[in-house]
Image (cartoon, rainbow, N blue to C red):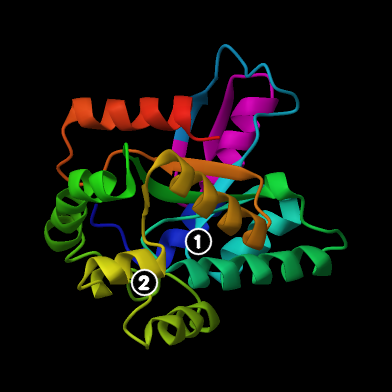
Amino acid sequence: FSINPAEARTRFAEAHEIIMRAWTEPGPFEHYGEHFKLRYVNVWPKPLQKPHPPIWIPGAGSIETMEFVAKRRYAYMGIPYFRIDFFIKNYAMFKEICEKEGYKAHPEQMGLLMPIYVGETDAKAREEFEKHFWYFQKNLIPGLTLSPPGYTSVRSALRIFKALQDGKTFINSCETWDDVERGGFAVVGSAKTVAQKLTEWCKEIGCGNLLGLFHLGDMPHEKALENARRYATEVK
């Protein structure tokens, strides 16, 4: 949206302040900040949750994001499209940062977002899903900039770049279906297979929230609905 990426942190912090005030303070109020000039803020009705709804913040490895979340005891959500061991390392770091804040991270403070497809069998699930995965990877991912100049601090940028150096960490590195499965870029299979993989990864990470991405690429609407229905009724 033609906004300087170097402003991302200060914009985020200011937006967070506005949202928290809107949820918790009786309105109306005026906000005149560095990035946002709002003459009249008055959220109505107020959220039922007190003091405010649960806050989930996504991250892709930035240390500043983890510190922001840990300090406020919010929930950290790993975004998809990275190899599963990248997530495991990120959550291990998040747990360490929480410990530095004086507490142990609760499972509900951590969540994993994964592309999921449930079929009648492992083979049929792959057959139904694979073409949509490759459409997404080849047509929608190219051009995505993970860390534009100024978007993160030097220490976070170096950490992310180091993780990407092997050329196999991000989804664009996949060349075969074996790459997809070994890297855990998507969870695809029968209900039993999907349940087994998700259980193993959630236990290893220690996360208590699972976010399912049931549509990907050019998947037709009805197929996405059937996928979600199978997951809801058959994955146990």
Q: In this view, does 141 lie to the left or right of 232?
A: left
Question: Which quarter of the figure has residue 50?
Answer: top right
Is 118 a magenta residue? no
Q: Distance between the residues labelled 1 and 2?
A: 13 Å
Please indicate, yes or no, whether residue 61 appears anywhere in the rendered image.
no
Question: Which quarter of the figure has residue 134?
Answer: bottom left
Q: Residue at x 47, y 66 (%)?
A: 84
Please indicate, yes or no, whether residue 156 appears anywhere in the rendered image.
yes
Q: Is residue 114 left or right of residue 16?
A: left
| Image position, residue 155 (x, y; %) | 54, 83
- Which of 108 and 16 lies nearest the eye of the viewer? 108
Three-letter code, disc 2: Ser
Looking at the image, is 223 positioned above or below residue 75? above
**Count of numbered tags:** 2
Q: Which residue is drawn at 20% across and 53% down?
A: 130
Is 31 a magenta residue? yes
SS of the residue under disc 1: helix
SS of the residue under disc 2: loop
Assign the C terminus to one quadrant of the image.
top right
Q: Which disc, if any, is residue 154?
A: none
Pointer 2 local density, CA inside 10 Å: few below 14, some 14–19, many at least 20:
some
Residue on which disc 2 sits? 147
Residue on which disc 1 sits? 9
Q: In this view, does 19 lie to the left or right of 228?
A: right
Q: In this view, does 1 lie to the left or right of 148?
A: left
Please report the bounds of the magenta region as a residue range: 14-37
Three-letter code, disc 1: Arg
